Amino acid sequence: MGWSQGYRPRYALDTFNCPACTGQTDRMADQQARTGEDSKPTETPAIRWEEPPEGPVLVLLDQTRLPAEEVELVCTDASALVEAIRSLAVRGAPVLGIAGAYGVALAAARGFDVDEAANALAGARPTAVNLGLGVRRARAAHRAEFARSGDEGRAAAAALAAARALHEEDRAASARMAAHGLALLGELLPGGGHRILTHCNTGALVSGGEGTAFAVALAAHRAGELRRLWVDETRPLLQGARLTAYEAARNGMAYTLLTDNAAGSLFASGEVDAVLIGADRIAADGSVANKVGSYPLAVLARYHHVPFIVVAPLTTVDPQTPDGASIEVEQRPGYEVTEITSPQAAVAGAGGGIPVAPLGTQAYNPAFDVTPPELVTAIVTEEGAVSPVTAEALAELCARSRQVTIS
């Protein structure tokens, strides 16, 4: 396997939650939250390209080890990156697109078969449309330059330039999504004091910038308009508990973790003002595929008259997928449900975790579910928001974006 891993601590993990107490905890937790740009932590990129003397590598922050420790995976070939993607060491739609592009560039730079690497990367996870998009973009740049010059070195450089451009575009898109999302919250919920519920992880760990949905919540925090970030733990792999809480703590946000099945009582008690989630694929009709558990939140939000907002770059919109029924939903291994894994615990199960169900238990474990457009209040992109969510509105936004890009 073409990777190695090392431990490189970069900062202390502070927690800004209050002690357990009865009743609501907003006052105590908010007193401990920091606001403003002075709370912005040192950037910790989820992915970066490096060129040591022994050859180029792709360095990933291993998200399966967070928050217990920060471990970096150093990928020297595309097969290592494929394994990192499948194991969720790197995850999240935007950063998967970036990873796919860098993976093609890595194969080209190290002299591997670019088409073989591209095919393996594109098939590593089927639902996230950004992964295939990033792979195709870097492969197209490689092919075009090789056809023009016949020089493998220049073709590899072109693939790397395409990956770096995609990385920078996603960084810029993240900032624009945050601005558009904050403006939309101001329109829907005038007066600030937002109590936002989020699911899975949509921060800097999934992006070239500060994320998608999390970036909006972070912008609200910095503007002094975030009263509470409710963090779904996001079973079975706890991306909310392990990753979103990790990012919220680092940014000094007032946050509270809850089990996924506690969300209903939270809505019923009137403690949620808006739901913000990301997306792994948005069909042409506005159907949204996101981490499993998102659809139930949309149903709850509709019943309780709470805005349900999806934040995603336009690269996540797939015009070739007509509707939600056409989205291929990835099925994950059953042991992710029947076992609990921890980087600091002894292991005994088939998947390397602690068994929590009888041996031989069958598990249903879709990675995503699909929310129909009629349950989505708005889709926020770097080019603005679409509301109500319709196929026509999405197509118009995508067309407008292409015109801006061409001009």
Image (cartoon, rainbow, N blue to C red):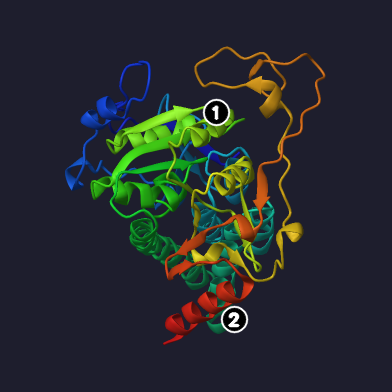
Quadrant of the rendered structure where residue 382 is? bottom left
Q: Which residue is mark 2?
A: 147
Q: Which residue is mark 1?
A: 262
User: In the image, residue 206 lies at what x, y percent?
Assistant: 47, 48
Give the amino acid type for the residue marked by disc 1 in the picture: Ala
User: In the image, residue 48 lies at what x, y percent?
Assistant: 41, 50
Quadrant of the rendered structure where residue 187 is? bottom left
Q: Could you tell which of marks 1 and 2 lies nearer the N-terminus?
A: 2
Residue at 25% across, 41% down: 41
> Foreground: 402 or 169?
402
Residue 210 visible somewhere in the drawing? no
Residue at 53% across, 38% down: 89
In the displayed structure, would residue 357 be above or below residue 225? above
Residue at 30% across, 44% down: 193
Residue 279 visible somewhere in the drawing? yes
In the displayed structure, would residue 305 be above or below residue 407? above
Question: Residues under labels 1 and 2: Cα distance?
Answer: 57 Å
Label 2 element class: helix
> Foreground: 181 or 127?
181
Q: Quadrant of the C terminus?
A: bottom left
User: In the image, residue 11 lies at what x, y percent?
Assistant: 27, 32
Residue at 56% across, 33% down: 264
In the displayed structure, would residue 20 be above or below residue 242? above
> Foreground: 236 or 111?
236
Give the amino acid type for the residue marked by disc 2 in the picture: Ala
